[in-house]
């Protein structure tokens, strides 16, 4: 036991020296490493789990809305193309009708063409062939 006593005396002297050096240099007060809000959230795991599910639900809903709007956009684009085609067809019909209105009725070729197309009439010296191939 006597051997251990001098060792403990040296340790006691070292501890008092280190205590004195520590007391000379005091550290400034430090903020906690974890903010209080995180500690509160960590204490309530149910709230964070609910928030995660709500966030995932919101993400899924926004993706579904985006996909639905893209599908609707494509449908509207297709409708637009179809309507533009109809407009061009109608414009061609209007141009043809305006051309027919502008032709004078005294024009012999016009009268013959209309008689052939609309009335099925032909000139006396013409030979007419009928075929069922086009029907």
Image (cartoon, rainbow, N blue to C red):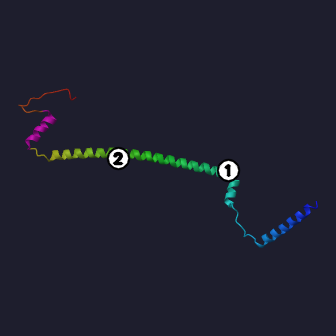
Q: Nearer the viewer, residue 79 or 40?
A: 40
SS class, disc 1? helix
Give coordinates of residue 70: x percent, y percent: 44, 47
Q: How far, Cα to Cα, is label 2 from label 1?
A: 50 Å
Q: Which residue is mark 1?
A: 46
Q: Is residue 114 magenta?
A: yes
Q: Residues within 10 Å of mark 2 (few under 14, many from 20)?
A: few
Residue at 24 percent of width and 47 percent of height: 91
Residue at 67 percent of width and 50 percent of height: 46
User: Residue 126, which numbered label?
Assistant: none
SS class, disc 2? helix
Q: Give the mark count.
A: 2
Q: Main secondary structure of the magenta part?
A: helix
Give coordinates of residue 51: x percent, y percent: 62, 51
Residue 118, quarter of picture:
top left
Residue 8, quarter of picture:
bottom right
Residue, far left: 125
Give coordinates of residue 64: x percent, y percent: 50, 46
Q: Nearer the viewer, residue 39 or 74?
A: 39
Q: Which residue is mark 2?
A: 80
Which region of the structure is painted magenta? 106-120
Apparent side of residue 58 relative to residue 128 in the rendered image (left or right): right
Residue 1 lies, with reference to residue 69, above or below; the image says below
């Amino acid at each position: 036991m006597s051997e251990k006593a001098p060792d403990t005396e040296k340790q006691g002297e070292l501890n008092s020296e280190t205590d004195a050096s520590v007391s000379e240099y005091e550290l400034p007060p430090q903020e906690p490493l974890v903010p209080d809000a995180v500690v509160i959230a960590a204490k309530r795991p149910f709230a964070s789990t609910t928030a995660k599910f709500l966030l995932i639900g919101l993400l899924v809903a926004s993706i579904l809305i985006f996909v639905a709007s893209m599908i609707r956009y494509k449908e509207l684009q297709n409708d637009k193309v179809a309507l533009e085609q109809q407009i061009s067809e109608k414009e061609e019909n209007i141009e043809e009708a305006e051309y027919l209105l502008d032709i004078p009725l005294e024009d012999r070729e016009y009268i013959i063409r209309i008689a052939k197309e609309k009335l099925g009439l032909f000139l006396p010296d013409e030979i007419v062939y009928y075929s069922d191939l086009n029907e």
